[in-house]
Amino acid sequence: MSGRHAEPQRRAHTAIALAAVAALAAGIGVWATNTDGDDRCAPDADLVLPCGAWWGAYIPYDDDSSLTRPVYAFEKKIGRKLDLVYTYHDMSGKPVDGELLTPDEQELGRERLLMLAWESTVWKEKHHANWSENQLGWKNIASGMYDESIIDPQARRIKAYGKRVFFSFDQETDFRIKEGAGTPAEYVAAYRHLRDRFEKLGVRNVVWVWTVSGYLDHKEQMRALYPGDAYVDWIGMDQYNYYQCHKSPDWLDFEASQRPSYEWLRENISANKPVMLSEFATAPDPRRPERQREWYEEIPEVAPKLPKVRAYVHWNRPVPGPNCDLTVNSGPALEGYKAAGLDPYFRQRVPRH
């Protein structure tokens, strides 16, 4: 999660796009339907699009632990359905946070893709409120200690769900080493064990995402943490323009915030795997609020220059610290994000199975 660390075409029919722009100018709410396109841009078995990209977000639960209400409210603000909803779970096995594919997730999954991030921890507070947790340990996951009690029941829930889901085990794994999860070799063993266990249980509807921060001071850790192409379907990275958040001194536009890590991962981890911006966002510039709008408006122009990036998932939750509101709930940030999400590059047909 972004709060974990402090370091820094498909072309839609022209008439529909013009109608959306005109309606927005008139102040009318418009839903981008995700049904324009043709089969030439249909995703493959690993949900990789041959053109364009998925448009997604992580939206926090509301005070009553509803996920559907905040997602629907967010979609109303941005004028379209999300292609992908990103959620996080611990390994407590409890319904609040440790049970994969909750009723709300299943409802949202009827018309959207789901990305399930599963942490090898037990959170101390509901929905990981203050980022506090107890580690289960990668070596214990790899040993099979939690197979029958934790892993198998959740794997069977995913299998019963049936529809394909993106699945990330211990996202931003390079930052988990210092938190006591274990060594890179133990992580690789745990990741491979988890996938092998799912395979043994006949869980075929999982698309496996290996997610790191992309923070380039962690190059050696990231190299050592890669489970291998045979075990990974997508590579995820979580890069931000933090600016004054976390004492980051420089403003990075969208391309400058993403390209260095994207290119490093392609050159050093795998040139073949599709890439997911599994978390991205920009902090505000208190002196120049319009910069947030410009940052998001740049995305459709940059996206074709990062051709392996086939999913964009916004982190819509503030993180601790001054000037760290990464949300796009209002103001220039909302304006820019809304405009980017209505671009034809991100108008995709979501599969129903």
Image (cartoon, helix red, strand yellow):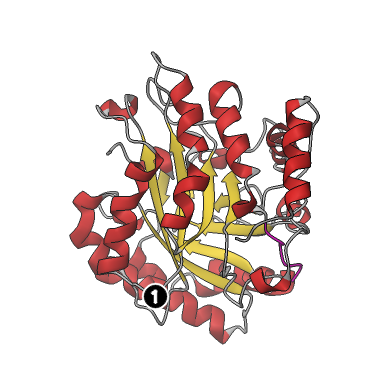
Q: Residues within 10 Å of mark 1 (few under 14, many from 20)?
A: few
- Position of residue 93 in the picture relative to residue 137 (left or right): right
* Residue 352 covered by magenta stretch: yes
Q: As displayed, is residue 181 above or below residue 129?
A: below
Q: Residue at x 55, y 78 (%)?
A: 198
Q: Is residue 181 visible in this depiction of the protein?
A: no
Q: As displayed, is residue 195 above or below residue 108?
A: below
Label 1 element class: loop
**Image: magenta residue range:** 348-353
Q: Position of residue 30 (x, y in %)?
A: 79, 38
Query: Splitting the image into 4 quarters, where does residue 252 fall?
Result: top left
Q: Residue at x 34, y 72 (%)?
A: 271
* Residue 272 covered by magenta stretch: no
Residue beneath label 1, please? 272
Label 1 is placed on what type of residue?
Asn
Q: Residue at x 42, y 56 (%)?
A: 305
Query: Splitting the image into 4 quarters, where does residue 31 fall?
Result: top right
- Position of residue 270 in the picture relative to residue 348 (left or right): left
Query: Splitting the image into 4 quarters, where does residue 242 fall?
Result: top left
Q: Quadrant of the N terminus?
A: top left
Between 298 and 193, the residue placed more toward the observer is 298
Q: Main secondary structure of the magenta part?
A: loop
Q: Position of residue 152 (x, y in %)?
A: 58, 73
- Position of residue 297 in the picture relative to residue 230 (left or right): right
Q: As displayed, is residue 82 above or below residue 132?
A: below
Q: Position of residue 93 (x, y in %)?
A: 59, 58
Q: Position of residue 9 (x, y in %)?
A: 60, 60
Between 75 and 86, the residue placed more toward the observer is 75
- Position of residue 50 in the picture relative to residue 179 (left or right): right
Q: Is residue 48 visible in this depiction of the protein?
A: yes
